[in-house]
C-alpha cells in the first residue's frame, strides 16, 4: 500500500520500519467493544480512524493470547489463539485487514522466555515423570537437602520470591518471573520448532513484525542436565551479564534468532522484530538488531537519562552509535506498559533514574502511593513530557509510543490495593505497587461509566481527573497534547530524511540541546527551568529559520524553560 501518509516510510520496502512511528496498544486497556470491562479487538477496530488521524505507521499489540492474566497476559496459555474475552481469530484477521487498509502495519508481542503454567505442554510436564521428554521442554531440577525438599539454589525471581517452584515429587521448575510463568528450555528442539511455527502462524495472519519479550534470557547456562551444583545467588550475580552469565545474554541466543531470521526472510517484505533488552552491557546490544538476528532492539537508556541535557545527549550519541554498529535504526521510547508514565516521571523531583527493575528500592510508584515525599509537580511533569516527546520525535530512527501518552496521561499512582493486578505487587509483597498505574484504560469521552472506554466499569478503576484527558476534550482544545502529537507526527513525516543529526553546540547554555537534521530541520530543547534568550542561541535575528512547532508557548525574547521548538530553514533562505 502506498498513500500519502506512508510515502515517507516506503510501505513496501524491506526496511519500512526504520523510521516508523509504532503505537503500543495494551489491548485490555485500549477500547472495550462489548462492555465486559476488558478492552478487545473489536475496540481496536473501532478506533482505527483515531490511529490514522494520530499519524502512526504501525501498532504493536501487547499479548492478547489466552491467559489467566497472572502477569497481564505475559503468561501465555496458547501462542496461536486469541483470548476469548478479547476476541476470536476471525476478529484478529478483520483487525489486520482494517489496519492494513488504513495504511498501518501490525506488530504482535512474542513471549519466548516462558509460557504460562496452563500451557498444555506445561500441564503435560507436570503429569509426566522426572527425566521424561515432556519435562525436558521446561527447566526442572531436583531439590537438595533431606527428601530433596529445598530449592536447587537461593536465586530470586524478578517479581520477588524464589525462582524455583516445587512440583511435589522432589523436583522444582525454574521461573525467572512469576511461578505461573515457567521458563522454556531452549536447548529442546521441540520448543525451538514450535516457536518457528508460531512465527509463521502470525506472519501468515498478516503480522508484519514482532516485539520479543525478555529477548536476552532465552539461553540459560544451566538446565535439567547441568551436572554441577548451581552457584549461589551471590556467585551468580557476581558474573557480568554476557557469555558467562547463567541467564542473561549468553552467546547461544544468537543462534536462536538466526533461526527466526530465516523464517522472517521467507516473507516479502521480510518480517522484522524488535528485541526487549534491559540490563544489557552496551557493547553487546547491537547483536540483536542486525539483519542476521531480530532486526531492531529497544534502547531504553533514554528513560534513565531523566530530564538532564548532558545525559540525554550522551544517550542519543550512544544509541546512534549502536544503530550504526548493527546496521539497524535507532529506537526511542519514553513510556511503555512497564514504566511510570513519563508525564509523572518528569514531575518527580529526582527523575534521573526510574528503572523500577534495576532500582526496586527506589520504586517511585511505591513512594507516590504511600503519600511520602517526593510529591509530583503536575505542571512541570506535563511541560517536560511535552518537551521530551517533541524532542524524541525529531530524532532519527523509529519511535515507539505508548497508548495515552499522546493525551499527556499521568500515572494513576493511587489505585486501591484491592484493584491491583500486577504480580510485582503481590510478590513484593505490597512493597512495590507495580505497573498497574500506567495500564489504566484510556478515557475517550469525559463522561460515561468508563469515560467512553466501554459501556460498563473498566477492569482497573479510572480516577475522576481522567475526564480532563479524554480524547473528546483534547480534540476541542487546540493546545492539547493530542493536537501537539498529531501536528508533530504530521510534520515529522514531511521532514523525515536520512537517519543522521548534527549537534549545534551552545557552550554557554549547557542546558540547551540543539541539533539539525538534513533538509534544514532543527530541534532545540531547553531542558533548564529558566528561559534561554534566543540571542544566546544565535536564533534571534534569523528570519531564515521559521519556528514551525513548539511544545509550549514561545516568547519573542527567549525559548522558555522545559520547552522544545522545531525550526525549519525557509525555502527562500535555502534558495538564496
Ligand atoms: C517483559 C514485559 C513485562 C513482563 C515481563 C515478563 O519485561 O514487558 O510486562 O512482565 O516481560 O514477561
Image (spheres, rainbow, N blue to C red):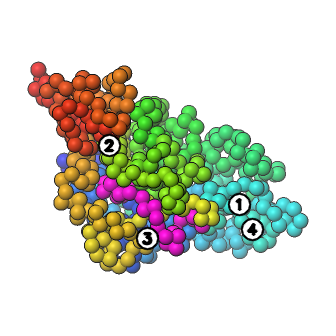
| Kind of element beneath mark 4 | strand
Disc 2 from disc 1: Cα separation: 42 Å
Of 509 and 58, the residue lying toward us: 509
Residue range (magenta): 402-426
Relative to 255, say whether 481 is above or below. Answer: below
Disc 3 from disc 2: Cα separation: 29 Å
- From the image, tell me which residue sits under label 4: 166
Number of numbered callouts drawn: 4
Relative horizontal placement of residue 290, taking residue 478 as reference (left or right): right
Image coordinates of residue 562 in percent, x first then y, are 33, 40
Relative to 138, say whether 255 is above or below. Answer: above
- From the image, tell me which residue sits under label 1: 162
Disc 2 from disc 4: Cα separation: 50 Å
Image coordinates of residue 385 in percent, x first then y, are 35, 47
Let me know if residue 362 appears in the view.
yes
Residue under the image location 56 percent in, 33 percent down: 283
State which quadrant residue 539 falls in. top left
State which quadrant residue 143 falls in. bottom right
Of 285 and 355, the residue lying toward us: 355
Let me know if residue 92 appears in the view.
no
- From the image, tell me which residue sits under label 3: 460
Q: Earlier in the sequence, mark 3 or mark 2?
A: 2
Contact, mark 4 vs mark 3 (Cβ under 8 Å): no
Relative horizontal placement of residue 539, taking residue 124 as reference (left or right): left
| Few, some or many residues within 10 Å of mark 1 (<14, 14–19, 20+) | some
Relative to 411, say whether 295 is above or below. Answer: above
Q: In the drawing, what numbered circle is on residue 387?
A: 2
Amino acid at each position: 500500500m502506498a498513500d500519502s501518509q506512508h510515502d515517507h516510510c516506503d510501505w513496501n520496502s524491506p526496511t519500512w520500519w526504520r523510521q516508523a512511528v509504532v503505537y503500543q496498544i495494551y489491548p485490555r486497556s485500549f477500547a472495550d467493544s462489548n462492555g465486559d470491562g476488558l478492552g478487545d479487538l473489536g475496540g481496536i477496530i473501532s478506533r482505527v480512524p483515531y490511529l490514522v488521524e494520530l499519524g502512526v505507521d504501525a501498532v504493536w499489540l501487547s499479548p492478547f493470547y489466552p491467559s489467566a492474566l497472572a502477569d497481564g497476559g505475559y503468561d501465555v496459555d496458547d501462542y496461536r489463539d486469541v483470548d476469548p474475552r478479547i476476541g476470536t481469530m476471525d476478529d484478529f484477521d478483520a483487525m489486520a485487514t482494517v489496519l492494513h487498509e488504513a495504511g498501518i502495519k501490525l506488530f504482535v508481542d512474542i513471549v519466548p522466555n516462558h509460557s504460562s503454567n496452563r500451557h498444555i505442554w506445561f500441564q503435560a510436564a507436570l503429569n509426566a515423570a522426572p527425566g521424561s521428554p515432556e519435562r525436558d521442554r521446561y527447566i526442572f531440577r531436583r531439590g537438595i537437602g533431606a527428601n530433596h525438599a529445598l530449592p536447587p539454589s537461593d536465586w530470586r525471581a524478578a517479581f520477588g520470591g524464589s525462582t524455583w517452584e516445587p512440583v511435589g515429587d522432589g523436583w522444582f521448575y525454574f521461573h525467572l518471573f512469576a511461578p505461573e510463568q515457567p521458563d522454556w528450555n531452549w536447548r529442546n528442539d521441540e520448543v525451538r520448532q514450535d516457536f518457528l511455527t508460531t512465527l509463521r502462524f502470525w506472519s501468515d495472519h498478516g503480522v508484519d513484525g514482532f516485539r520479543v519479550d525478555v529477548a536476552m534470557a532465552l539461553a540459560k547456562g544451566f538446565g535439567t542436565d547441568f551436572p554441577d551444583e548451581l552457584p549461589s545467588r551471590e556467585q551468580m550475580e557476581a558474573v557480568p551479564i554476557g557469555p558467562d552469565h547463567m541467564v542473561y545474554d549468553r552467546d547461544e541466543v544468537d543462534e536462536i534468532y538466526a533461526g527466526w531470521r530465516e523464517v522472517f526472510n521467507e516473507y516479502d517484505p521480510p518480517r522484522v522484530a524488535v528485541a526487549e533488552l534491559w540490563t544489557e552491557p552496551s557493547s553487546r546490544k547491537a547483536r540483536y538488531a542486525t539483519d542476521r538476528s531480530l532486526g531492531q532492539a529497544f534502547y531504553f537508556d533514554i528513560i534513565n537519562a531523566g530530564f538532564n541535557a548532558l545525559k540525554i545527549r550522551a544517550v542519543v550519541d550512544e544509541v546512534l552509535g549502536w544503530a550504526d554498529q548493527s546496521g539497524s535504526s535507532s529506537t526511542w521510547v519514553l513510556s511503555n506498559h512497564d514504566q511510570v508514565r513519563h508525564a509523572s516521571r518528569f514531575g518527580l523531583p529526582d527523575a534521573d533514574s526510574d528503572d523500577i527493575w534495576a532500582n526496586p528500592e527506589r520504586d517511585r510508584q511505591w513512594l507516590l502511593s504511600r503519600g511520602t515525599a517526593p510529591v509530583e509537580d503536575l505542571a512541570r511533569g506535563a511541560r517536560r513530557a511535552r518537551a521530551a516527546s517533541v524532542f524524541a520525535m525529531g530524532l532519527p530512527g523509529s519511535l515507539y509510543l505508548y497508548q495515552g501518552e499522546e493525551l499527556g496521561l499521568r500515572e494513576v499512582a493511587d489505585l486501591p490495593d484491592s484493584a491491583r493486578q500486577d504480580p510485582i505487587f503481590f510478590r513484593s509483597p505490597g512493597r512495590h505497587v507495580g505497573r498497574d498505574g500506567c495500564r489504566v484504560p484510556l478515557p475517550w469521552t469525559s463522561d460515561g461509566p468508563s469515560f467512553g472506554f466501554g459501556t460498563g466499569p473498566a477492569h482497573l478503576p479510572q480516577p475522576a481527573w481522567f475526564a480532563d484527558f479524554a480524547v473528546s476534550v483534547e480534540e476541542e482544545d487546540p493546545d492539547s497534547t493530542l493536537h501537539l502529537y498529531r501536528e508533530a507526527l504530521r510534520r515529522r513525516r514531511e521532514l523525515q530524511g536520512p537517519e543522521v543529526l548534527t549537534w549545534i553546540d551552545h557552550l554557554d547554555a549547557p542546558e540547551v540541546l540543539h541539533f539539525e537534521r538534513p533538509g534544514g530541520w532543527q530541534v532545540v530543547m531547553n531542558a533548564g527551568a529558566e528561559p534561554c534568550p534566543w540571542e544566546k542561541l544565535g536564533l534571534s535575528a534569523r528570519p531564515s529559520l521559521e519556528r514551525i512547532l513548539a511544545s509550549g508557548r514561545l516568547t519573542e525574547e527567549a525559548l522558555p524553560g522545559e520547552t522544545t521548538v522545531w525550526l525549519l530553514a525557509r525555502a527562500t533562505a535555502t534558495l538564496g
